[in-house]
Image (spheres, rainbow, N blue to C red):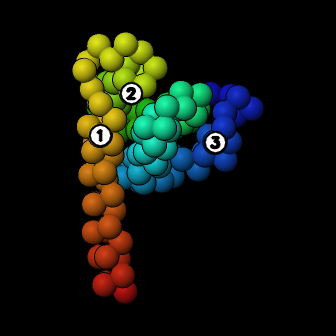
Amino acid sequence: MQVENVQHKTLAAGRWAEMPLSLQMLNIGSEISRANRWKAKGNQAQVERAVFRALELIDLTIEAQRGKHNLKEFTRMRETICDYYLGDNFYCSNGARIQRDFDIFYACSSRNQQTLITNH
């Protein structure tokens, strides 16, 4: 990925790969949340901007997780997001269902933060 063509330049330059997977997923989920809010307001241009940022982060995640995890789940997630927000919704998905997949990582992150605070 060429760093000049990305919105998240410092992340694409290598910082993303240093983040734990849960934090990567939380960041993607934030963009999905933005897409859902814009979709509810009927602003497709802003939906697309948020989705393109999410897709960029998914691509960075795929690169960072190569060899560590099965990439099929990440590519399926990317496909589902494209289908719902940019395509014909062939998979009959919805924004709430997609967001829920990312919200799981928020719960995990909160527990991990609590453990770190308690153990220090």
Q: Which one is nearer the viewer's eye here, 9 or 17? A: 9
Residue 75 can be seen in this image: no
Crowd rating for badge 2 (residues with CA inside 10 Å; few <14, some 14–19, many 20+): many
Q: Which mark is residue 81?
A: 2
Q: Secondary structure at mark 1?
A: helix
Is residue 95 positioned above or below 25 on the image?
A: above
Q: Secondary structure at mark 2?
A: helix
**What residue is drawn where x is 36% and y is 82%?**
117
Q: Secondary structure at mark 3?
A: loop
- How far across and how far down the image is residue 7, in percent? 66, 38
**What residue is drawn where x is 45% and y is 34%?**
39
Q: Amino acid at mark 3?
A: His
The residue that disc 1 covers is 96
Q: Which one is nearer the viewer's eye here, 106 or 43? A: 43
The residue that disc 3 covers is 8
Q: Amino acid at mark 2?
A: Ile
What whole-number distance in Å separates the C-alpha atoms at marks 3 and 1?
25 Å
- How far across and how far down the image is residue 36, in percent? 42, 39
What whole-number distance in Å separates the C-alpha atoms at marks 2 and 1?
12 Å
